[in-house]
Image (spheres, rainbow, N blue to C red):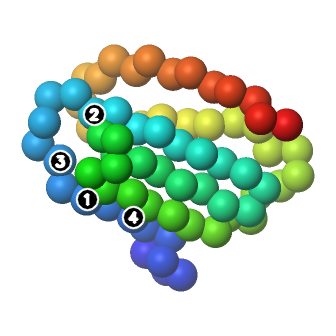
Amino acid sequence: VEYGRERKCSYEGKNLKLQIFVDTSSIEVFVNDGEEVFTARIFTAKDSSNISIFSHGKTDVNLKIWDLF
């Protein structure tokens, strides 16, 4: 919450599609092809290369990663 780091929206559907774009100083998240969109500045370590996904309850995840560098 501090410095505006928390982004959230309501969602009551069964399937959730997230498209997440990350570069060296920003992240953009598109929820269900743009129903909701979040943008934030980020300042990660230069060697940062991990992603974590969390869920309340059971979920199945299909993850595709494209390296644009």
CA gap, disc 4 and disc 1: 7 Å
Estimate the spatial distance between the alpha carbons at disc 3 and disc 2, rounded to whole Å.
8 Å
User: Seen from this angle, which residue lies furthest left?
Assistant: 12
Spatial distance from mark 1 to mark 3, Cα to Cα? 7 Å
Residue located beneath label 4 in the image: 7
Q: Is residue 23 left or right of residue 20?
A: right
Tell me whether the residue at label 4 lies in contact with that at label 1, contact meaning CB atoms closer than 8 angstroms: yes
Q: Residues within 10 Å of mark 2 (few under 14, many from 20)?
A: few
Q: Position of residue 47 (x, y in %)?
A: 88, 44
Q: What amino acid is at disc 3? A: Tyr
**Mark 1, secondary structure of its residue:** loop
Q: Which residue is mark 2?
A: 16
* Label ID, residue 11: 3
| Element under disc 4 | loop
Residue positioned 18% across, 55% down in the render: 10
Counting residues from the start of the chain, the first of labels 2 and 1 encountered is: 1
In percent of width and height, residue 42 lies at 67, 64
* Residue type indicated by callout 4: Arg
Circle 1 Cα neighbour tier, 10 Å, few/some/many (<14 / 14–19 / ≥20): few
Query: Toward the viewer: 25 or 61?
Result: 25
Query: Could you classify mark 3 by the number of other residues whose Cα lies within 10 Å: few (under 14), some (14-19), or many (20 or more)?
Result: few
Residue hosting label 1: 9
Q: Quadrant of residue 26?
A: bottom right
Circle 1: residue type: Cys
Report how many numbered discs are placed on residues in the image. 4
